[in-house]
Image (tube, helix red, strand yellow):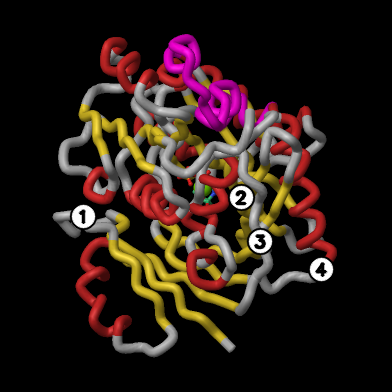
Amino acid sequence: MKPLPPGSVIGILGGGQLGRMLAMAAAELGFDVHIYTPEADSPASRVAARTTVAPFDDAEALARFASGVDVVTTEFENVPADTTRVLVAAGAIVHPNPEALAIAQDRVAEKNFFNECGIATAPFAAVDSRADLDAALKQIGAPAILKTRRLGYDGKGQARIATLAEADAAYAALGGQPAILEGFCAFEREVSIVAARTIHNGFAPYDLVENVHANGILARTLAPARVDARVRQQAAGLAYIVGDALDYAGVFAVEFFLMADGSLIANEMAPRVHNSGHWTQDACAASQFEQHIRAIADWPLASPARLCDAEMINLIGAEANEWAKYAAEPNACVHLYGKRDALPGRKMGHVTRLKR
Ligand SMILES: Nc1ncnc2c1ncn2[C@@H]1O[C@H](COP(=O)(O)OP(=O)(O)O)[C@@H](O)[C@H]1O
Ligand SMILES: [Mg+2]
């Protein structure tokens, strides 16, 4: 594939804030964006040239979409992998590839993948029945976390098991969905790395960053993470292995637990731009959104160098009402997603404070 020329059409599956920021970055490079989403009046569609509103299993709508775009990408990881397979069968170029998406959508497949790459994870076991949970707890012990295998995000679909007596309640909380039991990692910090890869093995990792969660939702990201150079380099090396093993094109993220002994335990990967990479919009020459568009359009990758330190603060629910306070700070960059209702727990925007 030759670099996709400006004027080409980039198709994005999903209409949320990540699609919105991808669409704006694509427009900066001269592309038109076509959003495909089941949601009417989505944040992304309001900044895109075209939108198809249809379910992800609408074969006719998908065929029309495939014939009208030059490359397809995804903005959220739960677009059914089969949707992307249908698009590939219809002749579309899809990045990331459906296999990468499928692995990231299933927590058991994802952890097996990490282990096959030689990357450490928490001990885990698949849980498909109440009896499986007992067997898994016997093997892994408590404390542990029971998570749905699929469709979890922002801490949803998880139940903690502090002692064995809590097993029944945790199992009931997940409603018998296919699950995974993970040993609890008493981490020192949570860190993540966002990196871009091209199909020609171009690789550009941003700095490792440090994440603080509240109620299972990312609250703040500090760039760079306060860790030593050895940890930073190790994380970049592991991200390289992940991208290479998935034959990946685009931006992806890997979340890690940093343990007291300095080791990194992989938690999950996201086959897309990531909330912990939003700081790159204001503190790097090219944001993760531009970098993703470059990668899927087969352009050269930009430098991922950090131009200054940064802190990203998520505006969750009613916190978005404080936009004017942040806008009055000279070195705060305000980003709002245009969502109509500030529901509790909903990501409404973010602020990046530039430091130095
Ligand atoms: N095995 C674990 N040990 C300790 N904490 C965990 C573990 N798994 C998840 N957590 C905590 O829960 C948060 C959300 O879990 P995660 O697996 O990242 O799911 P999500 O898809 O909702 O982001 C993590 O960022 C971490 O704080
Ligand atoms: Mg996570």
Mark 1 touches mark 4? (CB < 8 Å): no
Q: Does 109 sit above or below residue 261?
A: above
**Residue 129, visible in the rendered structure:** no
Residue assigned mark 2: 255
Q: Amino acid at mark 2?
A: Glu
Residue depicted at x 32% and y 45%: 16
Q: CA distance from mark 3 to mark 1?
A: 29 Å
Q: Secondary structure at mark 2?
A: strand
**Res. 339 mark:** 1
Residue depicted at x 15% and y 55%: 340
Question: Which of disc 4 and disc 2 is earlier in sequence?
Answer: 4
Percent x, y for residue 324?
A: 23, 81
Q: Secondary structure at mark 3?
A: loop
Question: Which of disc 4 and disc 1 is earlier in sequence?
Answer: 4
**Res. 207 mark:** none
Query: From the image, which quarter does the N terminus lie in?
Result: top right
Q: CA distance from mark 1 to mark 2?
A: 27 Å
Q: Nearer the viewer, mark 4 or mark 3?
A: 3
Q: Amino acid at mark 4?
A: Ala
Residue assigned mark 3: 304
Q: CA distance from mark 1 to mark 4?
A: 39 Å
